[in-house]
Image: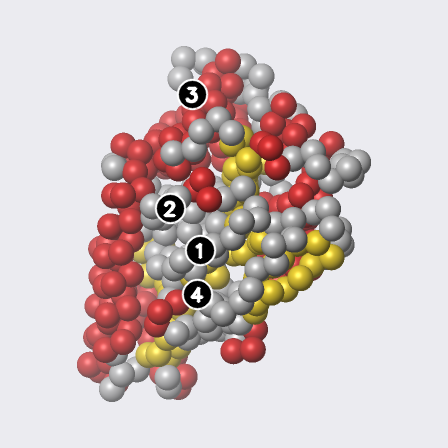
Amino acid sequence: MKIHNLSAGPGVLPEEVLRQASEAVISFVDSGLSLIEQSHRDRYFEEVMSNARNLVKELFQLDDSYSVLFLQGGASLQFYMVALNLLKSKAAYINTGTWASGAIKEAKKVGTIDIIASSEDKKFSYIPKDYSIPTDADYLHFTSNNTIYGSQFKAYPETSIPLVCDMSSDIFSKRIDASKFSLIYAGAQKNIGPAGTTLVIVKKDLLGKTGRNIPSMLDYQIHIDKDSMYNTPPVFPVYVSMLTLQWLKDNGGLEWIEKVNDLKSQTFYTELDSNPLFEGTVVPEDRSQMNATFLLKNEALTAEFEKMLKDAGISGLKGHRSVGGYRASMYNALPLDSVKVLTSVMREFANKFA
């Protein structure tokens, strides 16, 4: 039976990427070695790292004023690294959920944080829109997509100060003007590759201004100077990320995947809004394309619904343990057919129990 992987992360990857990656684990190009035995100092992997960085710039149409890094520690380490490298006096943050709250918590260890907007008052079920951005802040940080609660920025903040964004769960899912951002970071395990590496895109002229003595492993400039190889990089995750970015480019880039993701989310939300047994948890205008969160109105039917999901081969639909409910994660590599299987099960469930 085909398994339809709607997990929030690590998320689904393209089948052709998985095939290429599995072959490389046995024998990597003509090196005679497995990819995971390969020295990161060898020309074979140096080419992988270079190609991965160049593909990021190409997909986002970024010039050489930006550096691209593949680091370790997940997006959670970036919560602290961003502040350590950029925060001089104070920074502005928008709180839209668990990961944004985590970024705020870590940044407060470095300096003064001004929370200029929050949707915590309504359980993070919307994106704040009426707020003022202080012009004297060192940067504005926000999380583009709320993985756990299922909301997403449809328009990005307009500001003259440096814009910093955690794009972990919707990076490369649509066309954006990446040049409006001074720093973008994203854990790989949603739309880029397997867990183990984190993408950081940073405008080089932003760095070196805090006067702070930054530990080497947490200093963006040191990682830039060493081409993301100051220490041994996560070879396999970087390679799979390169393959995924190439897959994205070969199929038509961000313009192509935006159309695909639009269709998947429209298919799901059309069913959700018409189905009498389910309800969404986010205001419609702020619903995430990547992580659709919803509830079963009658919890007494939970066992019946989950049996139907299992019988249909649907995996990873349960909501985050902190909020419950259900979450359909529709990352780039999830086929439209998997969304259609889910909506078919939801319709069949309503026909049987409504």
**Mark 3 in CB contact with mark 1 (< 8 angstroms):** no
In whole angstroms, how far apart are the C-alphas of marks 2 and 3? 37 Å
**Mark 1 in CB contact with mark 2 (< 8 angstroms):** yes
> Which label lies toward us, 4 or 3?
4
> Which label lies toward us, 3 or 1?
1
Q: Quadrant of the N terminus?
A: bottom left
**What SS does tag 3 mark?**
loop
**Pointer 1: residues within 10 angstroms few (<14), some, or many (20+)?**
some
Name the residue that disc number 1 marks: 156
Name the residue that disc number 3 marks: 27
Name the residue that disc number 4 marks: 151
Q: Is residue 71 at all visible to an observer of this figure?
A: yes
Of label 3 and label 1, which has the lower sequence position? 3
Q: Quadrant of residue 229?
A: top right
The location of residue 129, given as percent across then percent down, is 47, 68
In whole angstroms, how far apart are the C-alphas of marks 4 and 3? 42 Å
Position of 116 relative to 233 (above/below): below
The location of residue 160, given as percent across then percent down, is 53, 49
Name the residue that disc number 2 marks: 176
Q: Amino acid at mark 1?
A: Tyr
Q: Quadrant of residue 264?
A: bottom left
Q: Quadrant of the C terminus?
A: bottom left
Determine whether, in the image, residue 105 is placed left or right of residue 26.
right
